[in-house]
Amino acid sequence: MSSEADKINILELNVRKHSNGKDHHTSDYEVKNLVVRRGQEFRISVVFDKDFNKTIHTLSLEFQLGTNPVISDGSLVEVTSSPVPGEWGMEIAKIDGSIVDLVVYSAFNCLIGKYKVAVIATTENMKESVYKEEIYMLFNPWCKDDAVYMEDEYLRNEYVLEDFNEYYWGNANQIGRSFWNQAQFEPIVLECALYLLKLSGLSRSQLGSPIHIARTLSSMMNSKDNDGVLVGNWTGVYDDGTSPTEWSGSEAIFEEFMETKKPVKYGQCWVFAGLGTSVFRALGIPARTVTTFEAGRDKDSSLTVDTYFSEEDGSVLEDMSSEFVWNFHVWNDLWMARADMPDGFGGWQALDTCPQEMSGGLHRCGPASLSAVKQGQVYYNYDTMFMFAEVNGEEVDWIVTASGKMKPADVNSRRIGKKISTKAVGEFQRQDVTDVYKYPEGTEEERVAVLEATKHVSSGKRLYNVGKKDVKFRIKTMDDAMVGEDIEFRVKIVNENKDESREIFINVTCYSVRYTGVRVHEIFKNKEEFTLAAEETKFHKVVISADEYRDKLTESATLKFFVLAGVRSTGQTFTGHYDYQLTRPQLNVEVPPEVRQKDSFEVQLSFTNPLPKLLQECLFRLESPGMEGHMKIKYRDVAPSGEALLRVKLIAKRPGTRQIIASFHSKQLTGLTGMATFKVTNVQ
């Protein structure tokens, strides 16, 4: 029987942060606590005030998640014995006098979050000694039994560990790119992700499910329902907050939200998607940022996007046309198994954190299996029908007569869902992933998927026969033009009838639009009639001067052309849409090719003002996972055709190949971005 002198006390717990971090791919997390991934062993050492004797001393662990943890929901785990595969357990690896090395095993499906770890030492029936520490437990894409397991090493490194990203914008003809600092290893991101899960009221027992966590955070990224992170704003008025085009990374947004506990103003789709990629990668769920060009916004679940034209002057009837085709829309893909669906529907799941429509009583969308979307199986969870319409809906144009009668003018089954894009693995290049979302347009497989989807539309699919056409109308691709230059729009018209001329009418209307397709200002309207001889070809040309559009542009610098044309004698009609992105100057970013960790180095930013007017309220932003924090720098006015030049001193924080992103914004010109790559070497 042991005596009072045999009692043992814990002096220290060494969580071996460096070695465990390396084994668990968590070394880059800038938090003081140990970060591990579930379903994978980790090692800790317990230091006692005297030698540990297995014959009289016992050692156990207790993991506690949240307040009032209980065993029944998995928030309280008592670990006392050798492990059973896939479950919690522990074993003593080594005893070296007063130091005991333990191997700890966590369950592959355990709850994720910040655990309090109690180490309990008992001397036979005598008083216990308890030592407490906190650790983070994350999802584990390296564990074959975890629902987020991703087999390919290169994909895991990209979609979990890459902290600097690229996303795409513009339209299918003019694809632009910008960069985003994901910052998933910064303390504020992991802290905010777990805070949002708690704030959401998600059942604690569901904290082990990537499906429920993804769906919950889809809602919590926006402010619509639960005072989540970010307020969406597409009005163009951002005076009481930050313009969406100013953000270049997630860290600043999460910092402001956690400091104020109020939604941050303002964001648009790419900002919401950037935040989503950050929190999911921080939690260990593989995630990518995805852009779909010509994305459909189907409000009535008909799987069509309808636009109504006035027969009289060709203008779009605003009070009837409430559905839009977004020039581009950005969301997230997440990688996970789908235990709630039949086999074959795991893998990439589409999830949108940008508040569009209600789903289950909240503004959220997904996760929707891309396999289900591709097959047209729109009846599966979650929001698969909405996602199908975004990438494979059909566009129907209507002509409305003076008496109010509507007749279909054109059905376009190929426009919606083009060039679906994400950053390529391991390089800053665009990867087209359209084939993951749908079969090639017009193929038998794609048509079957559409017909399968329409079976589940309550109103029935409206497919229309618009009749034979012997005059061909084709909108020609426009040349790129810088903001401040004139632009030319052309329609090619061919009379294929070998014997008869045709009386042609054509209406061209140009609007400034937001990237969502919402029309803001009418810029130009043109109407002409002419005779086209048999087998004649004509180019109808419209020139819009910079003076006509300059003061009516939105921050996206996007124009949209609508064409209503036809043949008087045959009743043939043509409707066409064309999205046009004015280009902006490149922001030049110059950095030294190599710098030492913790050393100061200079970054130089420059560009030339393309406008014949003064740029006012100028601002530069800089952000990088390789430097301390992020910067916001006010700058002087920039003269017409003048050069802006800024030099900034920064300090390198982490070794490795790093990127820095910079952006410029002003009242007259915004959204200029640039990026540079440099190497940070270790301090010797």
Image: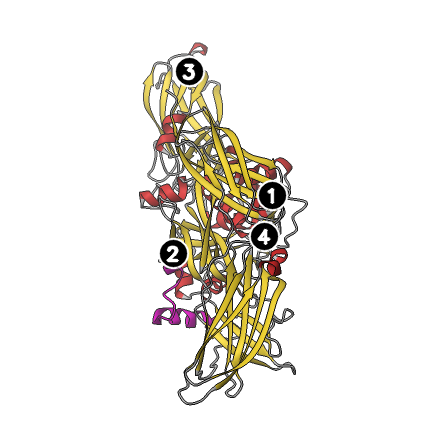
Residue situated in front as seen by the camera: 87 or 667: 667
The amino acid type found where label 2 is placed reads Val
The amino acid type found where label 4 is placed reads Glu
- The span shown in magenta is 434-456
Q: Pointer 3 and pointer 2: residues touching (CB < 8 Å)?
A: no
Direction from residue 667 to residue 678 in the image, left or right: left
**Residue with the mark numbered 2:** 433
**Furthest residue in direction bottom, as rendered:** 499
**Residue with the mark numbered 3:** 48
Q: Is residue 384 magenta?
A: no
Mark 2 Cα shell of 10 Å, populated few (<14), some (14-19), many (≥20): some
Residue situated in front as seen by the camera: 639 or 659: 639
Q: CA distance from mark 1 to mark 2?
A: 43 Å
Residue at image point 50% right, 70% down: 395
The amino acid type found where label 3 is placed reads Phe
Q: Is residue 437 magenta?
A: yes
Relative to 248, residue 533 above or below: below
Q: CA distance from mark 3 to mark 2?
A: 56 Å
Tag in front: 1 or 2: 1
Residue 64 placed where, x, y %?
50, 33
**Residue with the mark numbered 1:** 639
Q: CA distance from mark 1 to mark 4?
A: 20 Å
Q: Is residue 348 visible?
A: yes
**Residue with the mark numbered 4:** 555
